[in-house]
């Protein structure tokens, strides 16, 4: 994580992105995930985001990626449909509503003794 942290903090996020993606991604979504990942490894638990914050950021990044992909493919109808869909799902954090969203085991969202 130190390697990734150095790249992110210096503004060189492309230095840690898998080259096999071949620039088929939206930079804004990559930054959202990278910044949230850095917050997740803070030394003190009180400084780390909640699981619901993490899920929201991931959903936002997925929505951005879908919109960017629709633009690249010239499917403007898909953009408006994805925008409406993402607004509804992001508000409720309903991850099971679509097979395209991440699946999170409920046990991960409950506090445990460490």
Image (cartoon, rainbow, N blue to C red):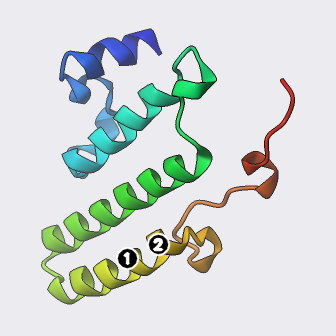
Q: Is residue 14 above or below residue 89?
A: above
> Where 49 sits versus 61, above or below?
above
Residue position for label 1: 87
Residue drawn where x is 53% and y is 66% of the image: 101
Question: Residue 50 at what x, y percent from top left?
Answer: 58, 43
Residue named by callout 2: 91
Describe the element under mark 1 as helix, strand or loop: helix
| Residue 93 spot, x, y in % from top left | 55, 67
Secondary structure beneath label 2: helix
Residue 38 falls in image quadrant: top left
Q: Residue at x 18, y 23 (%)?
A: 11
46 shown above or below 5: below
The foreground one among 61 and 50 is: 50
Determine whether label 2 and label 1 are within 8 Å by CB. Answer: yes
The residue nearer to you, when weighing 18 against 28, is: 28
Q: Residue 39, position in %: x, y?
A: 45, 28
The crowd level at tag 2 (other Cα within 10 Å; few <14, some 14-19, many 20+) is few
**Residue 19 image point, x, y percent:** 29, 34
């Amino acid at each position: 994580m130190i390697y990734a942290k150095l790249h992110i903090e210096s503004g060189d996020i492309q230095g840690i992105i898998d080259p096999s993606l071949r620039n088929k991604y939206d930079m804004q979504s990559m930054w959202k995930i990278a910044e949230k990942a850095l917050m997740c490894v803070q030394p003190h638990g009180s400084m780390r985001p909640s699981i619901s914050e993490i899920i929201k950021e991931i959903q936002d990044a997925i929505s951005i990626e879908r919109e960017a992909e629709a633009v690249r493919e010239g499917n403007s109808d898909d953009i408006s449909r994805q925008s409406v869909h993402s607004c509804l799902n992001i508000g409720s954090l309903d991850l099971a509503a679509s097979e395209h969203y991440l699946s999170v085991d409920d046990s991960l969202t409950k506090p445990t003794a460490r």
